[in-house]
Amino acid sequence: GRYAVPGNIVFQNTKDSQRNLVRKRAFSHTIIQEAEQLHHYQHSNKYRDKMTGTNGSNGNGAKIGTSTVKQGLAQMLKGGVIMDVMNVEQAKIAEAAGAVAVMALERIPADIRRDGGVARMSDPAMILEIKNAVTIPVMAKARIGHFVEAQILEACEIDYIDESEVLTMADEVNHIDKNAFNVPFVCGCRNLGEALRRIAEGCAMLRTKGEAGTGNIVEAVRHARTVQGEIRRLTTMSKDELYVAAKELRAPYELVKKVAETGKLPVVNFAAGGVATPADAAIMMQLGMDGVFVGSGIFKSENPAARAAAIVRATTHYKDPKVLMEVSTGLGPAMVGISDIKGDPVNFRDREGGEYSYEGRVPPKKHLHGATETQMYGSSWERN
């Protein structure tokens, strides 16, 4: 009879093959091929998925990329600058300036603030064009909770996915299950509780949320100091106090305990949101950040190439005032930016799935006068 083996090799039963030497040799050759094909098959993703019952790296199967590997990839970016770019030309400027990675997106945060509308994942064609043009890692943004956008980005084989509050939220309750992906994720945080919840979900790299697209560093400084202060507070607590702290932070106890023991987050934490000058980058590094994201601050300035190189040098030599003076000289005007962040109608920093509180804002239903809460008080991320 006929039967198939892995690799789609089909051959005859051995009883017929033994009648003459030629057919015998042919059969022996086929057996060798079969063994080779079986070896390759058993070491392939298809075989692994069949044996484990997973769907590989499409985000629905069991996790393959371990947290150790993903967090290790993020560690390789420490001390560097990651720049938002909208096209190949900007990506090449960023690479030439010394960026450790680029964030590919169709509209930088300043443009999203200006134009409004729904901000979504960028076109994969644009992402792949940038990916093919540079040799440094490429990141791209997915909406909070939009796991299908993340699946598409993983299929693009990019290096990191940013589950970003800068894009319009897809899910106001749930974040993406980042443990289900091979590719590492970057997430924003304003405080230690948010940081630990994102890590529990599988985040391999954190950044301050700041207030992207404003050119104003005040929120990034606030978030950095908040996280660092809450970490220091944990290190002074006894074991029984840590249980209470875990409840207050709404974070897993084991993560809280680990931070208390080590005095630091288990993943890297970059500064982001409002960095526009070399001095901005340096202050965030001196506050204990592991690196810097720069979005609108470079390509909304008068001289992007010079400013990009200056911010990279400032991030490296953040403790040397002479170098900081040198790189800050003659750059031309920085982006105009927004000074009254709290008065601005666009608020990126408060977007977090499941974190919105109606306390103090929404009266009992009987006071809604027939309207919905959204109609009367805005969507769940438009907080005062």
Image (tube, rainbow, N blue to C red):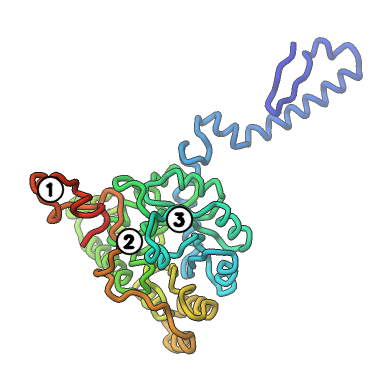
Q: Quadrant of residue 6?
A: top right
Q: Quadrant of residue 190?
A: bottom left
Residue at the disc numbered 2? 348
Residue drawn at (40%, 48%) of the image: 202
Q: Residue 237's spot in the image, x, y percent?
A: 20, 59
Q: Residue 69's spot in the image, x, y percent?
A: 49, 51
In the structure shown, which secondary structural element does the residue marked by tag 3 occupy?
strand
Q: Measured along the vertical axis of the image, is residue 237 above or below residue 279?
A: above
In the structure shown, which secondary structural element does the residue marked by tag 1 occupy?
loop
Residue reaching furthest right?
Answer: 21
Q: Residue 234's spot in the image, x, y percent?
A: 24, 60
Q: Amino acid at mark 3?
A: Lys
Residue at the disc numbered 1? 368
Relative side of 252 to 13, left or right: left
Residue reaching furthest front?
Answer: 370
Of residues 21 and 218, the one nearer the viewer is: 218
Of residues 371 and 346, the one nearer the viewer is: 371
For the question of whether residue 274 can be seen, the reply is yes
In the structure shown, which secondary structural element does the residue marked by tag 2 occupy?
loop
